[in-house]
Image (cartoon, coloured by chain):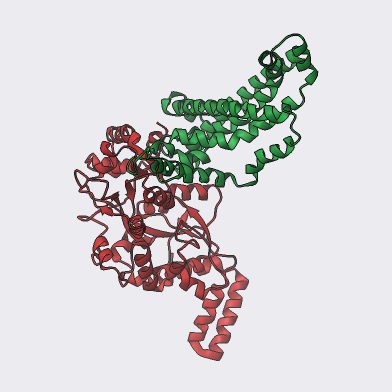
Chain colours: A green, B red
Amino acid sequence: MYSLFPGKHGFTLEAWRAFVHSSVYLSLFWKSVKMSLIVSAVVVALAYPVAYYLALSGTKRKYVLLLVLIAPFLTSYLLRVLAWKVILGDQGVLNTFLFWTGLRSHDHPISQLLYSRFAVMLVLAYVWVPFVALPIFVALESLDRRLLEAASDLGASRRQAFVRVTLPLSMPGVVAGFLFVFIPTLGEFITPSLVGGTSGYMYGNQIVDLFGTGFPDWETGSVLAIFLLGVVAALTLVFARFSQIRDVAAS
Amino acid sequence: MDGRDLTARRLRREELLKLAAAAGGAVLVGGPTAAAHAARTQLEAESGRLQVLDWAGYGNDGGQSMFAQYVKKHPGNKPQFTYMTNESDALAKIHAGLSPDLFRPYVGWVKYFATSGLVQPWSPKLIPNFKHLNPFMVKAGQYNGKQYGIPDDWGFDAILYRSDKVHPKAKSWGLLFDERYKGKIAWFDDLEMITIAGLYLRFKNPWNQSDSELKKSQDLLKSKKHLVRLTWSSETNLWEAFGSGEVWIAYAWPNDWVQMKKKKLKVVYMHPKEKPIAWVGMFMLLKGSPRPRLAHAYVDAWSSAKSAKWLEDNYGYGHANTVARPSSSDLLRALQLTNPKAVTEPNAHLDRDIPRRATYARLWEEVKAS
């Protein structure tokens, strides 16, 4: 192995070599990427109509509604995540409702709701919806309404005006919102450790475990962390570039 | 290290002069007993709060009765706690800059820490209750003839299951890998799972597996991971999942059995035919601790018969103090508290040093990541 500083604690690329040749860590990273992509896409899809209504419906109470939307941020992150355990557990609100309706028997609750990949994605989506709604709201708020009037005057239907005018002009907000979710959820470890069980284990959990609860392996942990940092930085640059191009095109 | 070594190391010249003056004055006024008392008082004037790194449930979060004697004697120096989830976590915290005066790894880590340069031996003479501790466990806390670990709590790693839901085919660690109970099993988040796989696979020495054995152990765990609902790292995680019915079978400690019985669940704490793994908690004194006398006083409090009985009655663990007896005869039988060698063969495998600990840890991390 290459070593720049020979000695017991010298710099070595051994941990990088092991990382690149380990299918385990890269598979886990890919699994986390897929989970984060799904969460980000779902969150954007949920947040866009909310932001659209607040920005373009003309309601006078839009700032009050916006405040309601971000109100969960006034409570603890942990509390919001833990609340889902009460809802999703075998004896939780959802299963109890199913028992009550007779759709499930007490001996056969839906177990996949908690300690699963689904639970992690559901909770992450819930936690991040307001984060995404805000940048989209800002993008839609700054939209020049005369463009929509012009589209209408030129014979565009409401759907066409949305697809050809509103959506392209709100893309910087959508991209920003997408990134707001994708970047932190890719390295997420608290939510998976609380509601993920073994199947919801993510790349961020592995980094934490390598530094802490596992027999400390800071070299491998550092490699995993630097790799994540590099990927996130590269993605941010790409998205930023993409966003700028759209801005230019829109203007 | 004995008491004299501690004295010499901790006292500067002016402190020694003050001590001599105090002792001399006391001899004139009250004789030799008062002199010893004055010296002790002076020596015990260690500044700063005692820093303890311990497991959840053993600090101000429910374990107060265990060190009540210490708090009574040192009301002005109540211990301050940081919690550890396992020994690796403690090691990581210490490497990251945490400086507790004492902490509690288990018996399998005595050699590791004794040779790590992070800890120093205790002075048993400064622990009056030391004479009541189980000699077998005391010996297990020694390395190169020095007392690096003071034994206190002990118990087993075995299997807890719901008897109304689970019907084991055999009393075996294999219940943790039983396909019939997919999604209802909990493992422990620790490299010990590699050892347990080795026990199940009947390897000669599960604590020192060869490369091929390690691969078989890891392959077993990877192939059975899909059955596992969660790997727990804190008991509260387990109690929550087990208590609410999410999990029916778990790697567990005696206290978990006690807690689930309190919830009126039908539970069995099964000793597998491959034998459970027995553990003994070992208080260790960090090298360079600025409060060694207080640390000794704290450990002495934990070692008293009163504390031991409280631990047995309330946590369902055994205690190294051989004088203590729990109120429950069930517990007395289950833990074989009258058997001084309950923690070893033929009853159980006493946990021991793992020479390739880093390899075991890496393989376990890979199982979790797989």
Judging depth in this view, the residue of A2 and B109 nearest the camera is B109
Instruction: From this view, report whether residue B42 is shown above or below residue A143.
Output: below
- Where the C terminus of chain A falls, by quadrant? top right
Judging depth in this view, the residue of A19 and A163 nearest the camera is A163
x and y percentages locating residue A151 in the rendered image: 75, 12
User: Residue sitting at 29 percent across and 39 percent down?
Assistant: B181
Judging depth in this view, the residue of A41 and B206 nearest the camera is A41
Judging depth in this view, the residue of B73 and B114 nearest the camera is B73
Asked whether, in this view, residue A139 is left or right of residue B193, the answer is right
Asked whether, in this view, residue B95 is left or right of residue B145, the answer is right
Q: Quadrant of residue B310?
A: bottom left
Asked whether, in this view, residue B314 is left or right of residue B209, the answer is right
- From this viewpoint, which residue is outermost toward the bottom? B29
User: Residue sitting at 73 percent across and 17 percent down?
Assistant: A247
x and y percentages locating residue B55 in the rendered image: 45, 56
Instruction: From this view, report whether residue B255 is shown above or below residue A22.
Output: below
* Residue A228 visible to an observer of this rendering: yes
x and y percentages locating residue A135 in the rendered image: 69, 29
Instruction: From this view, report whether residue B246 is shown above or below residue B11.
Output: above
x and y percentages locating residue A127 in the rendered image: 58, 37
